[in-house]
Image: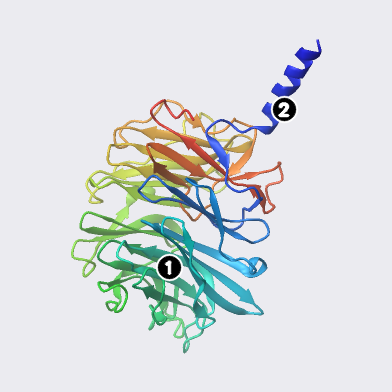
Amino acid sequence: MAGIILRICIMVLIFVSAAWAGEEKLIQESCNRFKPLHVKADGRGNIWTACYDIKGAIHIKNLSDDKDFIVNEGSESISEGLSFDVKGDNVYVVWMEMIGGRKRLYFRAIRDSGKTLSDPVLIDDNVTQAFIRIETRSDTSGNVYVLWYGGKKVGKASEHLYSVSSHDFGKTFSEIKNMTLGYDESIYPSLLVDENNAYMFSYSSTGFEINDVKRYMIFRKTEDGGRTWSEPVEIGKIGVVTLFIEPIKVGNRLHVFWFNTYDAVPIIEGAYSEDGGKTWVRTAIEETRGFDIGYLRVVHDSKGHIFLALSGIWEFGQKERVYVIKSEDNGTTWEKMIPIRHYPFDITTVTKPDILATDDGEVVVVWADFRNIRSNLYMQYSKDYGRTWQDKDIPLEEPGRFNTALYAYTDSLVKANDRYHVLAYRFKNDIVNIGEADCPLIEFTLADGGKR
């Protein structure tokens, strides 16, 4: 009898304490869910992650060896923002520290596949009064680019985008460049890098002083590692961009997408260039007109398939819905929006879809779903470039047991060694408006229908 009771107790303990197979806790400490969370694959089978713990330490980890680097040790209480990039053997991290209104941007590199951590490099000592919107990108030749949003007043202009670059894998950096000089206000820094060039996009405005505001999507390009940049190209006048600038390059075609509003009517717009950004063709994805977007992700494969995953509402008071829209001809034409959630009721909401596409036709979408009252992660996938999808949504965790969420402004989904990995925040109870949470990394494969 005692043995039966013992076995029952063990089973109950396992149910209460253990997560599903196929997931692991990122760090032993609690994470701060209000701060950025990153996951990236290095193309060699390694998965790197970056997060803040609840005390403000920034953790950088390679899941292959479980080594945990703290890059801001001693400055935990004054650190904000987090930008993160992985390229080959190198990992790059940028964050801001603020003391008494003085804002400093710091850079560190982890080199030799995680063997060495560089000393901090101060790249901005309150020169630009940096905000925490920071973009870091790199190539395999040692060029590293950092682009950020700064609040220093220049003449009558209040906000600009600034950049620095390195040509020696982040050992030294250039002088700070004002990338949007001549505009009154610029926000939403967006940076795209390939093996030859770097491309910058921004949402910039003029005419504040004369009450004749004009808004533009701005493009600049460097072909020499950031030593010089092209003059700004105005892709075109636009409406009010409230969120999201998503640049990609597919073949020789550069793309940029943004969420725009004209006279309170929202729509996803874009533009593409086939001459390196000298001239642009404007596009509007008419299927999205009137859809008030809360979240947008853009991905592609190398064959000209482009996929947008988006969540939002069609009318006030409606619960958020999640859709996918795709192009099979490199953005020249767009197909109809597909509701990706297979659930018959509209009384619960969804949010923050992330998406990944591969050259062999796999397209995977993951989102946070409230169909079980608590927020759980669900997944849908296609194996034929998004032409058909599964009949049922696939839960990535035990339905109804946890409150789990994706961070809104960074990648949450990667693939390495034929397995997909999702990095999320999981709350410790039903109080979800506090900062403390765990960070599970959830692993699954499509070979057995999403089983983990």
Looking at the picture, does residue 249 appear above or below residue 383? Answer: below
Residue 393 image offset from top left, x and y in percent: 47, 30
Residue 113 image offset from top left, x and y in percent: 42, 55
* Outermost front residue: 115
Give the quadrant of residue 427: top right
Residue drawn 21% across the image and 54% down it: 251
For disc 1, the neighbor class at 10 Å (few under 14, some 14 to 19, many from 20) is many
How many labels were placed on the picture? 2
Residues under numbered marks 1 and 2 in contact, where contact means CB atoms less than 8 Å apart: no
Residue 117 image offset from top left, x and y in percent: 49, 64
* Outermost bottom residue: 155
- Taking the image as drawn, is residue 144 in sight? yes
Image quarter hosting the N terminus: top right
Disc 1 and disc 2: Cα gap in Å?
48 Å
Residue drawn 77% across the image and 18% down it: 6
- Taking the image as drawn, is residue 243 in sight? no
Residue 402: numbered disc: none
Residue 189: numbered disc: 1
* Outermost top residue: 1
Three-letter amino acid code at the position of disc 2: Leu
Residue drawn 43% across the image and 36% down it: 340
Residue 13: numbered disc: 2
Give the quadrant of residue 259: bottom left
Looking at the picture, does residue 264 appear above or below residue 46? Answer: below
Looking at the picture, does residue 429 appear above or below residue 275? Answer: above
For this view, does 220 lie left or right of residue 209?
A: left
Looking at the picture, does residue 409 appear above or below residue 20? Answer: below
For disc 2, the neighbor class at 10 Å (few under 14, some 14 to 19, many from 20) is few
Three-letter amino acid code at the position of disc 1: Pro
Q: Nearer the viewer, residue 371 or 247?
A: 247
Q: Nearer the viewer, residue 331 or 228?
A: 228
For this view, does 158 lie left or right of residue 304?
A: right
